[in-house]
Image: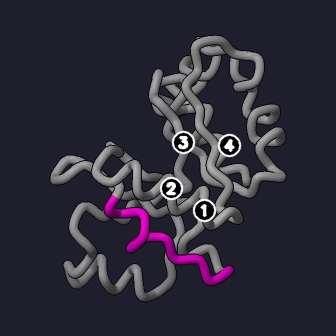
Amino acid sequence: GGCGLATIQLAVAMKANVVGICSGKNFDFVKGESGIDQMENVNLELVDYTDDKAMSEFKEKNIGKFDCIYDTATGSGHGENYVSSMAKLLKDVTGEYVQINGGIATLMRYFTGTMKPQQNFFFTSDEDNQTDLVEITRLLKSTGVK
């Protein structure tokens, strides 16, 4: 969806190595809509979450390797919950798990201080923040993403 594509574009603009997890039928869409298929020197790996073997192998080979996991699916209302299975891929102590959706249970864990280690919940505002938007625009323009 839109949040995942925007995240890929921003991560690429910041020169990050990016792994996108989506259905295999959407690989071309993700590459095309993000503009990554037209860029050079981009490190993007796509993993098909509908392929149990591919997901299992991906998880096994990447334990403790990620600086950040940005989860756009958990808590989106379709029953997905990847926190437990994906959090072990984070680097010890420094890895950050960012979940953008969440229901009342997530809010309660946040307010009671019982979030899982390395998991953060960020509140967003609908107020304009021109400084952030200018920086995001600069990053996107500098890499040629759509």
Report the Cα–Cα distance between label 1 and label 2. 6 Å
Mark 1 touches mark 2? (CB < 8 Å)? yes
Q: Earlier in the sequence, mark 4 or mark 1?
A: 4
Q: Kindly report the distance in space between the C-alpha atoms of the residues bearing marks 3 and 2.
A: 14 Å
Q: CA distance from mark 3 to mark 1?
A: 17 Å
The amino acid sitting under disc 4 is: Leu
Instruction: Measure the alpha-carbon separation of dots 3 and 4.
Output: 12 Å
Please state which amino acid type lies under the numbered disc 2. Answer: Glu
Is residue 132 placed above or below 46 in the rendered structure? above
Between the C-alphas of marks 4 and 2, the distance is: 24 Å
Q: Was residue 131 drawn as part of the magenta stretch in this picture?
A: no
Give the numbered dot on residue 57: 2
Q: Secondary structure at mark 4?
A: helix
Q: Residues within 10 Å of mark 1 (few under 14, many from 20)?
A: few
**Which residue is under mark 1?**
53
Give the label, 4 or 1, closer to the camera: 1
Looking at the image, residue 10 lies above or below residue 29: above
Determine the residue positioned at 56% across, 55% down: 126
Q: CA distance from mark 4 to mark 1?
A: 25 Å
Give percent across and percent down for residue 127.
52, 51
Which one is earlier in the sequence, the residue at label 3 or at label 2?
3
Q: Which residues are magenta?
A: 78-88
